[in-house]
């Protein structure tokens, strides 16, 4: 583990945080959060926890048993973790997905900061939005867009039945916004907003135009733009939020929930933006 402060040591007083996913080796969350913790002089450390799907329950219970202060949750566990939590906050309950766990007096509290990571950077009032993907990452995006005033959210996925199920599940939660599934794949880009909530990085599933606002939750850990982000910049889109900006936005909210301290946004952004240079661009 490479800490933000090379002189830092881990001992019995160090507070532990982490990220649960499978895989997690690519995640920049440890780099980002350790930089933030170091900047504030906190005796905390954030580590990756690779957890196979069959062991999600054991992993969540392990947080409690080991005295871990909290964790992020990433693909493919954002929905599955809810069954193993003691308290599900409204942000997670409404969308049926959690990306943040807080251990509070032995209880596992689930919440979601993903929606704040998307909606805060967009102007979606009255807009028609296209969400690519129907997994746990898509759910908070749909709800956040609806809460921000979108008129319509269209969900498209390679498996049409998954898109149908998600749209049906969230239709009542998102009112008065209309949530509908699209039958075609890949879908049309005839919308105002495009959000990629799939893991696809090397293919632009739709081609944006200058009028679009574009968000890609996926990112390359070396900082190279995904295919969708590259296409959005080339098209001169109205607003472009790449996966690194999204990571910092949602991560800052999680950080503040765990530590009770204001997140050092500039430090977090520098940590993830500098990852590619430190890795030699590879």
Image (cartoon, rainbow, N blue to C red):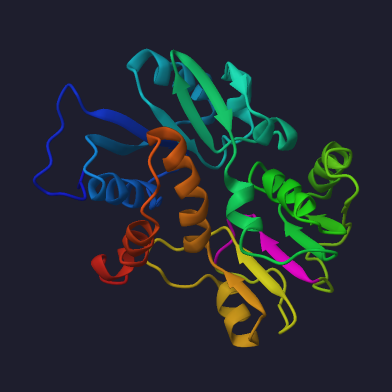
Q: Looking at the image, which residue is at 62% across and 56% down?
A: 118
Question: Is residue 143 left or right of 276 when viewed as pictured?
Answer: right
Residue 241 can be seen, yes or no: yes
Residue 158: percent from the left, percent from the top? 75, 54
Which residue occupies 63% across, 75% down?
Answer: 239
Say which quadrant the N terminus sits in: top left
Q: How many marks?
A: 0
User: Can the viewer see residue 157 in this picture?
Assistant: no
**Along the line of sight, the residue nearer the viewer: 148 or 50:** 148
Q: Position of residue 49 (x, y in %)?
A: 38, 34
Point out residue 193 in the picture as x, y percentages from the top left corner.
74, 68
Look at the magenta stretch and give its main secondary structure: loop
Q: Return the x and y of residue 93 as percentages of the image width and height.
A: 70, 30
Region of the chain picked out in magenta, as a range: 192-201
Q: Nearer the viewer, residue 113 or 210?
A: 113
Residue 66 against residue 151 in the figure, above or below:
above
Q: Is residue 207 or residue 116 the one in the foreground?
A: 116
Residue under the point 39% across and 49% down: 263
In the rendered view of the protein, which quadrant contains the C terminus?
bottom left
């Amino acid at each position: 583990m490479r800490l933000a402060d090379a002189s830092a040591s881990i001992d019995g007083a160090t507070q532990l945080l982490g990220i649960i996913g499978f895989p997690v080796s690519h995640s920049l969350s440890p780099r980002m959060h350790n930089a933030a913790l170091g900047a504030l002089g906190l005796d905390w450390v954030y580590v990756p926890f690779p957890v196979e799907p069959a062991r999600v329950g054991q992993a969540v219970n392990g947080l409690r048993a080991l005295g871990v202060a909290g964790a992020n949750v990433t693909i493919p566990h954002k929905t599955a973790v809810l069954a193993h939590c003691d308290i599900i906050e409204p942000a997670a309950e409404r969308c049926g997905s959690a990306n943040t766990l807080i251990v509070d007096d032995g209880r596992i509290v689930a919440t979601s900061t993903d929606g704040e990571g998307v909606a805060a950077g967009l102007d979606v009032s009255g807009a028609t939005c296209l969400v690519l993907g129907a997994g746990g990452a898509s759910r908070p995006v749909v709800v956040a867009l609806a809460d921000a005033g979108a008129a319509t959210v269209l969900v498209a996925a390679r498996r049409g039945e998954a898109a149908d199920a998600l749209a049906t599940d969230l239709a009542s939660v998102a009112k008065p916004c209309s949530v509908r599934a699209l039958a075609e794949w890949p879908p049309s880009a005839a919308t105002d907003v495009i959000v990629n909530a799939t893991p696809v990085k090397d293919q632009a599933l739709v081609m944006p135009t200058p009028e679009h606002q574009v968000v890609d939750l996926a990112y390359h850990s070396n900082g190279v733009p995904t295919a969708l982000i590259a296409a959005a910049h080339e098209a001169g889109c109205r607003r472009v939020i790449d996966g690194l900006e999204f990571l910092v936005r949602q991560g800052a909210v999680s950080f503040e929930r765990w530590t009770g301290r204001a997140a050092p946004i500039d430090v977090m952004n520098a940590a993830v933006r500098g990852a590619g240079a430190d890795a030699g661009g590879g």
